[in-house]
Amino acid sequence: MTKVRKSKVQARKEKPRKAAPQPSTAHFLLEIGCEEIPARLIVRAAEELRVLLGKQLAAYGLAELDAIESFGTPRRLVVSVPALRGRQPDSRTETLGPPKSVAFDNVGEPTRAAESFALKQGVGISQLEITSTPRGEYVVARKTVPGRPASDILAEILPRAILELSFPRSMYWTPGGAPRFIRPIRWIVALLNEKVIPFTVGEVSSDRFSRGHRFLGSRKPVSIAQAGNYIDRLRDNFVIVRPVERRQRIEQQLSRLAAQKRLRVRPDAELLDEVIYLNEYPTGILGSFDQGFLDLPEEILVTVMRGHQKYFAMQDRAGHLAPHFAAIINMDSDAGGVIRAGHERVLRARFADARFFWDSDQKCRLADYLPQLAGIVYESRLGSYLDKVERVRSLARWMAEQWFNAGTPEADVAAADRAAELAKCDLVTEMVRELPELQGIVGGLYAIEQGEPEGVAWAIYDHYRPTGIDDSIPRNLAGCALAMADRLDSLTGCFSVGLIPSGSSDAFGLRRAALGIVKILLERGLPFSLSAAVATSANLLRTLKPRLEVSADMEEQVRRFLQERTRYIFRERFGYDYDEIDAVLAAGADDLVDAEQRIAAVRSVRRTKNFEPLAIAFKRIRNILEKSGGGDGARLRTVREDLFAEAAERDLQSASQQVAMDSARLKRAGRYRDALEAIAGLRPVVDRFFDEVLVMSDDPSVRNNRLALLWHLLREFSTIADFSEIQAEAPLRR
Amino acid sequence: MKKNIKKSLTHTGLTFQQLIMELQRFWSERGCVIQQPYDIEVGAGTMHPETFFRVLGPDPYRVSYVQPSRRPTDGRYGENPNRLYKHTQYQVILKPIPKNIQDLYLDSLVALGIDLQQHDIRFEEDNWEAPTLGAWGVGWQVLLDGLEITQFTYFQQCGGLNLDPPSVELTYGLERIAAFLQDVSNVFDLRWTDQMTYGQVRLAEEQQFSAYSFEVADASTARELFDMYEREALSLLSRFPDTSGAERERFPVLAAYDLGLKCSHLFNVLDSRRAISTTERAAMISRVRAIACRAAEAYLAQRGQLPEAAPAATGAERP
């Protein structure tokens, strides 16, 4: 590498740059001022904004993602980067030009080629350098591209990032259909230390003027002199910007209020998460309601309080509901009790409605609503809810019978049947129309009230459970049968009419339904044949309304769908590794509880000394069989001892016969771990076989006999798990 | 109930009719045409042609009016303190949307005597959709100390057409606001005037229309009427495309829409009689919507304002 020459011009150019000190870091602040953003979307939007900007800022070398904070209140989305580099780092580029021999003549003067290359690169000829490459010496243009100031870059990327935010239902508010955002943007603060970063989004130009609390803050826009002052300036104007602080304040207020009455706040994490984003200056107030309403079931009272009014319910020490509630208001106090009185009046009206529904719904019995279910379509091709109820009844009964026959005496077939008959009746009650989140629960409550057996009532009450992977399963077996029958009927039915979940579309919640079935099976440890259950469900769709054609292929698809969900639970819930799951399901996945026991056994023996080497040997066996024609020939043959040519063959045969007997006995006793250990004990003979025996003997009859030996070995010992699926090198654990 | 009336009469706070007059004054001062309630049964102020048609097309418009709104299934024979067969909405439409619309709205509450510093007022997400009108928007319900007093909606689509510019719709629930102002817990105890209660003015109407919609209305007659109104509406609308010039200008698009409103109300009556199955419900809603959407297109076509790309598919822009 030779430096050619240094021009005077360049030296002069460099001087002022030296004089200007490299800007260090600055505090960057962005506040998107909005009309009230839906509470449920704020967390996601703030995080999305952080990631969107983070990617850009990292690409420009201005900040790393974890140096970026974002948060939100109902009226603002905020991004703060306390230490943003003031300038993009300079970058150096290197462009290879013509070979030196072409660029310079024999006296070292530049040729036309050098001139045009320098011109194209925008550098002086004197700045060209020579570099040696494997192909010889070449001319190279090295340039330092000065980084741009952060404020210029921000002015470019901010408006784009803001409009790139995605919302489930965005809107426009000015003519022309743009910009779109979740609610109208009314102001934008964009500061780098004390300097405004200028840009516009729609009709709003960025500036330094924020807004305080709508009612408690300054009436005028709040000027932010320095990005670093933002949080304090807003606090002075009754906006607590950081959600963590709002959470703390709410929690403190709630426990103070509860202590006043010697009560406890009924824990409600979901509601807490919501009220944090409904208020900029949250304050708790305590209200009361008439004792008389406590006659209504707690489920109903709590749902009315939390769902409609966002109130926290209160409990006494024994956990009974108390006639008080805590409301979080967006003000600093309620000195005169005016706000409390208002909230109490609203709650009184809501409770009065609930009582009206409770009484009027029960003017007739739950079963009397059954005919009305004929008027509610479940799915146009699958008929009404009444049709569904008929199918679910039969299926629930069948399931309970299976369990009873398998030696579970508490599987009450009659209770499952009755519960299934009544399960959907509450869909036409006023209470469920008003409080749809209480479907099932209301039916259960009415059933108790009307003297149905407790087992039936709880089965109805629980039958939408589990609602997710963390929810509990129905408390009794009738409830389990009903919950599973309801979901399996939905699965088979929807699949049969082509409603198969794909990507994000799963209108009937079939993934969740399948997950529910698997979760119940595994948690209750219920014996269950997936194929028999799907076949029964399919038969009911064929023989009862809507009398569909359900193909065998469709049944297979439903089974596979359930197995997929099973894999998911095994992985996410039980923490099993992929290969353990694959190995076991390959050996049979019709009874999921049994499969789980087998996985547990595989997991517990896989780290013992013989197991993984044996797994490698099994994989080798499978490869050999596949190469020799899929083992088809081997399958047909029995192993003939007279064709054995080596002692190792004979030993393997006799050892495997012994182990096969032992392991089959252990397996029958459900002692999968012991069975696996017995199989793993084959390792030395298998190893010796491969050491001493060449499978692919020139003598076809000897060769085929050996293949047959291996085929039988593989099959015999793959009934608990297919060992060849086990990854010998332990995969990363989650 | 009688005891309560005496007590409530001693309270201050605007009477029901003062409340209406105050809102009319407020919005009149802000440039609104003060319109009259529509004279056909409607379920909401949105169905009034002054909203349904005026939000279409580019012309600026500001209008407000009282709209008694019938919801047959909400009827309770005047026995429930909070639910009514017919409640009273105060409707405001502003096109284009003023930048300070939220402040304007809050000012209107101040004008009603509500001290914003003494109460808990919040805007909570509530997206609105009127399937029979092919209309939807996003916005909030406004809560005053936990009581829903206003529906605040940024209209995005109406009659299946994208709105450009969009409009804002404010719908005040007058009974609720009056009950709040008068500190009354039973709607029938509201003071309509200083001499008359809401119950004295309206109770009989609640009783009779509840009886009619829950017990008496003849479902097959209602169906027949529905079909007849629909037939007439569609027969009008089908003639519109062939018109031009002066004939087009005076073509009764508004009359076709009125017939659609009749259908909508009859649908509600049938619903309260529980004479509609879920499948049929969806079908009837889409029949009413078809009339509304075709009327909306004809309205714009009549004024030469139908965008090239129109008609937009109903709900096309809905995410």
Image (tube, rainbow, N blue to C red):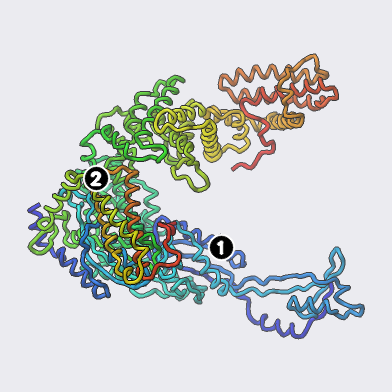
> Subunit of mark 1?
A
Task: Please say whether residue A514 is visible from this viewpoint.
Answer: no
Residue at 78% x, 83% y is A7
Closest to the observer, A16 or B142: B142
Residue B261's spot in the image, x, y percent?
Answer: 27, 57
Whether residue A174 sits left or right of residue A129 in the image: it is left
Task: Please say whether residue B59 is visible from this viewpoint.
Answer: yes
Crowding around mark 1 (Cα neighbors within 10 Å: few <14, some 14 to 19, many 20+) is many
Q: Is residue B111 above or below residue A576?
A: below
Closest to the observer, A366 or A195: A366
Closest to the observer, A130 or A574: A130
Residue at 73% x, 31% y is A626
For the C terminus of chain A, the image quarter is top right
Disc 2 element: helix
Identify residue for label 2: A354
> Subunit of mark 2?
A
Residue B243's spot in the image, x, y percent?
Answer: 35, 66
Q: Is residue A512 above or below residue A608?
A: below
C-beta proximity under 8 Å, tags 2 and 1: no
Question: Closer to us: mark 2 or mark 1?
Answer: 2
Specify the quadrant of the image occupied by residue A210.
Answer: bottom left
Identify residue for label 1: A54
Residue at 23% x, 71% y is B34
Q: Amino acid at mark 2?
A: Ala
Disc 1 element: helix
Closest to the observer, A179 or A16: A179
Q: Residue furthest top?
A: A642
C-alpha distance separating marks 2 and 1: 49 Å
Specify the quadrant of the image occupied by residue A416.
Answer: top left
